Image: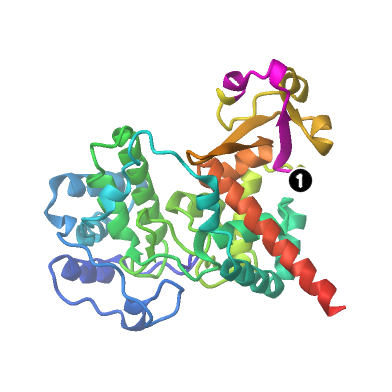
Amino acid sequence: MRFLLPKPSRTATAAAVLLAACGFAWSTGALAQKSVNGRAGAASPVRGSTPYATRDDAMQFADDVAERRGLDREWVRATIGSARFLPNVPRLMLPGPVGTVKNWQTYRGRFIDPVRIAAGVRFWRANADTLARAEQVYGVPPEIVVGIIGVETIYGRNMGNFRVIDALATLSFDFPDAHPRAADRRAFFRGELESFLSTESRTAEDPLVPVGSYAGAMGMPQFMPSSIAKYAVDFDGDGRIDLVNNPADVIGSVANYFKAFGWQPGVPAIYPVHFEEARLQKALLLAPDILPTFSADSFVAAGAVPEGDGINHKGLFALVELQNGLDMPPTYVAGTRNFYVITRYNWSSYYAMSVLDLGQEVKAAMEQQQQAAR
C-alpha cells in the first residue's frame, strides 16, 4: 500500500481489470501473491465468489462515484465489477447474541501475552528514534503507538488476507439487513469504498492487489481507506506513504491520527478509582458510557473517587466499566479525554484498555531488560 506515485494510464488498467471481472487469469507476478506481512509468496488472498459486474446497484454506484470524484468511468466500473462477493463476511458483522456477558480478563488475554510483548520490545528497539520523534511532533507517547500496532497486527505479522476491494464491495452492497444499524453501516462502507477508489486512482498500483481485514482495514495500523486519506503521513520523507512495510510511516500515521482526535500530551488515559458506597450513583455515572462528562468534583459527588493524581485532574472523566463475566465483579477505571481518543480508533473500552495494557507491558519489559544489562 504505497501512495504518492505517478498516475498510470487508466485505459490499460481498466482493460486488465475487465479481463479479471470476466473470469480471465490476472497475472501480476509476485504482487499477486502479496502476503499478509507485505512479502511475496507467503499467502494468497481469500477468494470471493460472484463478481459485482453483474449487479446493477454496484454499477450505478460506480457511475455515481466516477461523477462525484471526477474519475475515469470505465476504470471505476471495471474495478468494482472485478470485486467478488465474500459469503462469510456479512455474518462477521452481526453483533453477538443479546444478553452475552463480556469478560475483560478473557478479552485481555487475547492481546497481552509473552509472544506479543516480546514482539513489541523488538519493534520498539528497532524504531526507538522514530517513536521518540513522533512523540515530539504529535505528543503521543511511544507506548500508545506500540500498543496500537501490537493489538492490531502484532507489528505487521497479521495484516489480513482479504482483498480490500472484495471486502468493501461485499459490505457496501450485501451488508446484512439483520444488523440493527444496517443502513448506517452500509453507508459507511460505501464511503470507504469510494475513498479506496479515489486513492487507488492516484497510484501506479493494481487496485485488485491490496489485502487487509474482512472489513477493509489495511497495513500495520489497520487504517480504513478514509483514515489513510486523512491521517496517513510520509514520516520518513521518502516521497511515498507505505503502511505495510515502512514502520516510520506507520508510527507517524498512528500518532497523527491520535493528535487529530484531540490527544492531550502528558495526560494519563485512565486513573484508578474507588467508590464511596454511601453516595454512589452508578447509573448516573455510567449513563454517558465512555464519553468524558464529569468534572473531578462532580465525579466525587456521585461517589466515584479518582486515586492518586486523578483527584487533581483538570479535565472531564468517564466511569469505564469492564465486565468480568458472571462470576466476578466488573473492573472500573476513571477514563480521561485520552482514553476516549483511543476509542476513536476502535469504539470499545475493552479495546482501549488492551492497547494501554500492552503498551505498558512492553515498556516494563524494555525497562527490565535495560536494568538486567547494566
Q: Please name the amino acid that badge 1 sits on.
A: Pro
Crowdedness near tag 1: few (<14), some (14–19) or many (≥20) residues, C-alpha within 10 Å: some
Say whether residue 327 is left or right of residue 295: left
Name the one closer to the observer, 269 or 65.
269
Position of the C terminus, as image quadrant, is bottom right
Tell me where the magenta segment starts and ends, as one range: 268-285
Q: Residue at x 19, y 69 (%)?
A: 20
Q: Is residue 271 magenta?
A: yes
Is residue 261 something that shows in the picture? Answer: no
Q: Is residue 82 visible?
A: yes
Percent position (x, y) of residue 181? Answer: 33, 33
Q: Residue furthest right?
A: 374
Position above or below: 290 against 13: above
Q: Is residue 327 above or below residue 58?
A: above
Which residue corresponds to mark 1? 265
Residue that appears at 72% across and 67% down: 365
- 248 or 340, which lies in front? 340
Quadrant occupied by the N terminus: bottom left
Q: Residue at x 21, y 56 (%)?
A: 85
Residue shown at 56% from the left, 52% from the top? 231
Q: Is residue 233 left or right of residue 303?
A: left
Position of residue 79 measured from the top left corner of the image (x, y, whole percent) = 26, 60
Name the one closer to the observer, 268 or 102. Answer: 102
Residue 38, horizontal then vertical, whole percent: 45, 74
Please tell me whether residue 143 is drawn above or below residue 284 in the rendered image: below
Where is residue 134, by image quadrant?
A: bottom right
Return the residue nearer the eye: 315 or 69: 315
**Residue 327 coordinates in the image, percent (x, y):** 51, 40
Please tell me whether residue 122 belongs to the stretch shown in magenta: no
Q: Helix or strand or loop: what does disc 1 sit on?
A: loop
